[in-house]
Amino acid sequence: MKNTLTILALTLALGTTAIYAKTAGTVNGIIITVEEADKALNIISKGTEKWDTLTAEKKKQVLQMMAPSKLVAQKASKSLNKKEKEAAYSAFWMQKKMGEANVTDEEAKTVYDKMKASALKAKSNQPIPEFEIAKNSIKMQIAQEKVLGGLMKSAKVKVK
């Protein structure tokens, strides 16, 4: 009995901590925590402002700024089917991993030079953009290849 009461007390204590995280406000009933507001403020103010030090008017402005993303997330969660959600998660994950991939200008230049040589060899009539113009697109392509290559290294493909 004592163990059951101890477990119940711990469960209530831990559960109420999560349930009662300090709320900054709500939008259509969706809670925005002070922690979320502080993260947004850290980005907006470059770390110079905190939720607890804002005036009521500034707090309202922060909540209004955060509201659209909360509303979009709520609508997406309710209206997307399973396949659409998987596609969205996959695209977001891929974008995140590509952003983390380290691609140097030298790598991009090497790919650019190969592409330029291939175009010249094929006597292409397409104008070849300068490296600085094409660099970011090439870097994105390389990052995508790095992420996909890493996935494929550990993939176990079987034909049945």
Image (cartoon, helix red, strand yellow):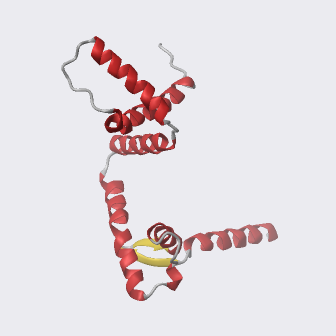
* Residue 52 spot, x, y in % from top left: 53, 83
Please indicate whether residue 63 sits to the left or right of residue 49 in the image.
Answer: left
Location of residue 86 in the rendering, given as x and y in whole percent from the top left corner: 39, 41
Q: Residue at x 47, y 78 (%)?
A: 24
When asked about the image quadrant of residue 73, the answer is bottom left
For the residue pair 85 and 105, the one nearer the viewer reads as 105
Q: Residue 110 at what x, y percent from top left?
A: 44, 25
Q: Quadrant of residue 8?
A: bottom right
Nearer-the-camera pick, 96 or 11: 96
In the current view of this chain or complex, which residue is farthest to the left? 125
Q: How many marks?
A: 0
**Which quarter of the rendered picture does the N terminus lie within?**
bottom right
Is residue 38 positioned above or below 129 on the image? Answer: below
**Residue shown at the point (38%, 69%) measured from the top left:** 66
Instruction: From the viewer's perspective, tell me whether residue 81 is left or right of residue 146.
Output: left
Q: In the picture, residue 11 is in which quadrant? A: bottom right
Is residue 103 in view?
yes
Q: In this view, does 21 lie to the left or right of 116?
A: right
Q: Is residue 108 above or below residue 76?
A: above
**Along the line of sight, the residue nearer the viewer: 124 or 153:** 124
71 displayed left or right of 96:
left
The residue under the point 54% across, 77% down is 22
Residue 98 on image: x %, y %: 46, 40
Q: Can residue 28 be seen in this view?
A: no
